[in-house]
Every structure is written in structure tokens, then in C-alpha cells.
Image (spheres, rainbow, N blue to C red):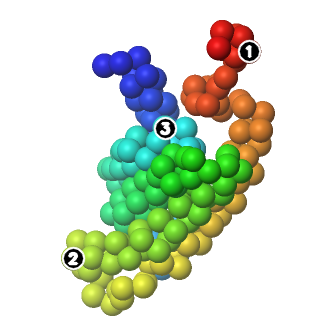
């Protein structure tokens, strides 16, 4: 295992633990347990670790939350799709564009991925696994949007401030150019 992979694994484990611990802050709404901290973690993981690591962290957090009774099976599609899309928008879609578009793209990716795509993907889980026969295709879009919007607003405040101060960049080792690196080139 490369040193960078080990670094990302440790960061993903830390973010997963943060999401699980933060899931103590829950807001019940229409059978779903809203956890805005999960969305904050999804954006941080997507931005700093990339889409695949972020999706893995979202899956692990949902799995642990389900095992500990802090979440429902509906946590899987929202956290996995949202974190993947946040990372994909930040790293792949807007990579060649100006850096000014990368963070808003990650925020929009999390919001759309969790709310719309995750909300739609929750329908088969609710219908088949949870035996919720009253669920319709769009039942979970609004509850997921409520949770995700709150988490995204928190992420906008925290991640934007941390990006400006480059604090998280130094912790996660992303996009950091030290003066010694510039002097060598």
C-alpha cells in the first residue's frame, strides 16, 4: 500500500468516525432520520479524498450507523451517491476550470446527489426492505433535501473558511504548494 493510500485510508476512517459521532444529532422526518453532519463529512471527503474514497466513507458511516441503531437503511443511497457526486464534481468535472467553480460544484453535487438521486434510490429500499407500501417514488426527496441543505450550509461555512486558511489542505495534504516546492521548480 502506498503512503498516499494509507494517508487517505486514515483520513477516510477519521471522517467516517466523525459522521457516526455526529449522527447523534438527528432530526426525524417522515420515517427518515436526518443527519446534517453526514453531509458535511460527505463534502469534506469528496473535496479532500476524491469521489471513490468519499463514497467508501459514506458507505462505512451508513453501515456503522445502521449497526448501532443511529440510522436506517435509507442512509446508504443518500450518503454514497451524494459524496461520490460531490467528489466527482470537484475533482473531475471542474478540474480544468477556474478554482472558483470547484467548491460550489462540490456543494451542488452533494445537494443534488443526496436529495434527488439518493431520494429516488431510497424508494426501492423503502418499498422492498422496509416494507413501506405507502412510499412513492418522490417520498424521500424532500426529507433528504432538508437534511442535505442544512449540512451543505454548514459545509459552505466550514469548508470555505478552511480552504481560505488552507488548514484542511495541510491536514489532508491536498493542493498544497510550499514555498520550497516553488523554489525548486
Whichever of callouts 3 and 1 sits on the residue coming sooner in the sequence is 3
- Cα separation, mark 1 vs mark 2, equals 56 Å
Whichever of callouts 1 and 2 sits on the residue coming sooner in the sequence is 2
Frontmost residue, 119 versus 128: 119
Residue 64 in percent (x, y) is at 36, 46
Q: Which residue is mark 1?
A: 179
Q: Which residue is mark 3?
A: 49
* Residue 53 in sight: yes
Q: Residue at x 65, y 14 (%)?
A: 185
Which residue is the extreme one toward the front?
185
Total of numbered circles in the picture? 3
**In the drawing, does residue 37 fall left or right of residue 80?**
right
Q: Mark 1: few, some, or many residues within 10 Å (few <14, many ≥20)?
A: few
Residue 118 in percent (x, y) is at 41, 68
Could you say whether the residue bearing mark 2 is in a helix, strand or loop?
A: helix
Could you say whether the residue bearing mark 3 is in a helix, strand or loop?
A: helix
Asked if the residues shown at circle 1 and circle 2 are in contact, with their CB atoms under 8 angstroms apart, the answer is no
Q: Which residue is mark 2?
A: 128
Q: Residue at x 41, y 17 (%)?
A: 3
Q: Mark 3: few, some, or many residues within 10 Å (few <14, many ≥20)?
A: many
Quarter of the rendering containing residue 154: bottom right
Compared to 146, does 68 lie above or below?
above
- Cα separation, mark 3 vs mark 1, equals 23 Å
Compared to 2, does 47 lie above or below?
below
Compared to 127, does 65 lie above or below?
above
Q: Residue at x 58, y 30 (%)?
A: 174
Which disc number belongs to residue 88?
none
Frontmost residue, 162 versus 175: 175
Q: Nearer the viewer, mark 1 or mark 2?
A: 1
Q: Residue at x 41, y 60 (%)?
A: 81
Amino acid at each position: 500500500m502506498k503512503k498516499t493510500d494509507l494517508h487517505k485510508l486514515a483520513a477516510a476512517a477519521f471522517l467516517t468516525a466523525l459522521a457516526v459521532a455526529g449522527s447523534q444529532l438527528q432530526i426525524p422526518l417522515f420515517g427518515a432520520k436526518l443527519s446534517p453532519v453526514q453531509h458535511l463529512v460527505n463534502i469534506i471527503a469528496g473535496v479532500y479524498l476524491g469521489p471513490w474514497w468519499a463514497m467508501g466513507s459514506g458507505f462505512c458511516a451508513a453501515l456503522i450507523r445502521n449497526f448501532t441503531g443511529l440510522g436506517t437503511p435509507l442512509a446508504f443511497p443518500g450518503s454514497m451517491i451524494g459524496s461520490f457526486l460531490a467528489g466527482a464534481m470537484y475533482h473531475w468535472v471542474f478540474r480544468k476550470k477556474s478554482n472558483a467553480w470547484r467548491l460550489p460544484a462540490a456543494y451542488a453535487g452533494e445537494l443534488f446527489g443526496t436529495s434527488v438521486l439518493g431520494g429516488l434510490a431510497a424508494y426501492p429500499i423503502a418499498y422492498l426492505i422496509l416494507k413501506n407500501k405507502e412510499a412513492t417514488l418522490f417520498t424521500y426527496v424532500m426529507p433528504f433535501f432538508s437534511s442535505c441543505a442544512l449540512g451543505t450550509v454548514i459545509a459552505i461555512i466550514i469548508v470555505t473558511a478552511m480552504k481560505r486558511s488552507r488548514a484542511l489542505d495541510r491536514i489532508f495534504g491536498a493542493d498544497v504548494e510550499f514555498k520550497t516546492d516553488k523554489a525548486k521548480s
